[in-house]
Every structure is written in C-alpha cells, then in structure tokens.
Amino acid sequence: MKNILVLHDVSLVYGSVTALRNITLSIRQGEWAAIMGSSGSGKTTLMNIVGCMNKPTHGTVILDGEKISRLNAKDLTAIRRDKIGLIFQEFHLISYLTAVENVMIAQYYHSMADEEEALQALERVGLGHRAGHLPRQLSGGEQQRLCIARALINHPKLILADEPTGNLDESNQAAVMDIFHQLHGAGSTIIVVTHSPEVAEHAERIVQLEFGRMIRDGAPPRPMVA
C-alpha cells in the first residue's frame, strides 16, 4: 500500500514554545492509526497540521502525493474540503437544519448537493429513519453518527477524528467504534486523536506524543489468550 500521508521532520514553534518537535511519520492508505497523548502533548497541534488547519514552521507534509506544508490558507481549505473528512468531539452541526440537510451542506461546499446520496450516507450510519430530525432531536450518539455521515459524504482520502467518543456514554462509544471498524474494513484510512486507551486499542497502530515529541509508534497491546 502507498503512503497517503507523510510527515518529515515536522516542528511547530509558537514564540518560545515548541508545540511539535521533529515529527517523522507515515500513514499507509487503508491504515487505522491512533494518535495519543495527554493535554499539552502536541496531539491537537499535529491534528491541525494534518487537517490543513495550520502549517508547520519546519518540515514537510505530503497528503495524497501533494506537498501541503507551504500552501496558503485558501489552498489548504480546498485540500481539507476535497480530501479530508473531519469528525470532532464537539459536533458543529447547524441547529436549524435537519440531519439530511447537515450532510447536504457538506456536499454543497464540495460540489453539488444530492439528497439521495445524503440519505444513503445516513443509512450507512444507521440514521436513515432520523433524516428529517433537527440536531436537538437527536441523542449525543446519533449526533456523532450524523457527523460521521457528513464527513464521509465527499469520499475523503483521509478520515480524521478528534476525540470522537469524548462526549459519549459506553453504549454510544461502542456504536461509533463499530462504524469505524466497518469503514476500515471497506478500505478507509482513519486517524483517531484520543486520550483514551480503550479507543486507541481499536486501531492497528498507536502513535504516542509527549511534550511535542513522538515517544512511541507501534501496534496496540493485545489481550493474552489463555
């Protein structure tokens, strides 16, 4: 499999603070990786760089064969729109639009809204029967599944999820992780940023940050078989 994402010697400095320090990392197409770290570790900074919301002060970032590390804000917005499906802990849904309209608005900014395709995306995450409901009429788990449908609608090269289960109870966390397993099984490339070992252990690979440095990169621990 080819590398869909490559970071080489990436650092980000804010004044006297080094938020990321010399990160070198490759993610293969179809891989599921978890980025872990405590508050202040640099995982959100790394997510913002990969998600085209910030640029490194040093180093190279290549996404789907295109060097994005020195693109301007307008070009980064286009890359993010066309190649990345973002899923946030805070849902960022439009309160006065229905579930299907929240999905269609993502289509509108990408190319052309297609209600039938948006409904299919909702069916994929088990929300077809809730298509006409407003966000406030959905549970937290349903809102997060709606966010996943919105992220998938434009067929992104990379799914980037920031603490996707952070606001969910155990049952809804399991439902969201089941969807990620289905997406991974279908060939999607997934990066989940999380502080939760339970969430990270679903991935094929865990990358752990501490004080802006990468201190671990490897397979998650697996339970021993008796």
Image: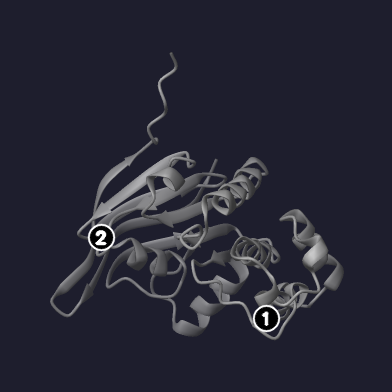
The residue at 50%/71% (across/down) is 90
Colour pattern of the rendering: one colour
* Kind of element beneath mark 1: helix
Q: In this view, does 21 lie above or below 175?
A: below
Between disc 2 and disc 1, the foreground one is 2
Q: Mark 1 points at which residue?
A: 109
Residue 190: image x %, image y %? 53, 52
Sequence-wise first label, 2 or 1: 2
60 and 213: which one is in front?
A: 213
Instruction: Pick out the residue farthest to the right.
Output: 116
Q: Is residue 21 above or below residue 201?
A: below
Q: In this view, does 206 lie to the left or right of 185?
A: left
| Kind of residue indicated by mark 1 | Tyr
Residue 196: image x %, image y %? 39, 50
Q: In this view, does 203 lie above or below 38?
A: above
Tag 1: Cα neighbours inside 10 Å, few (<14), some, or many (≥20)?
few
Question: Quarter-wise, where is residue 216 in the image?
Answer: top left
Tag 2: Cα neighbours inside 10 Å, few (<14), some, or many (≥20)?
some
Instruction: Pick out the residue farthest to the top.
Output: 226
70 and 81: which one is in front?
A: 81
Instruction: Look at the image and tell me in which quarter the C terminus lies.
Output: top left
Residue 41: assigned label: 2
| Kind of residue indicated by mark 2 | Ser
Residue 144: image x %, image y %? 60, 63
* Kind of element beneath mark 2: loop
The residue at 16%/73% (across/down) is 17
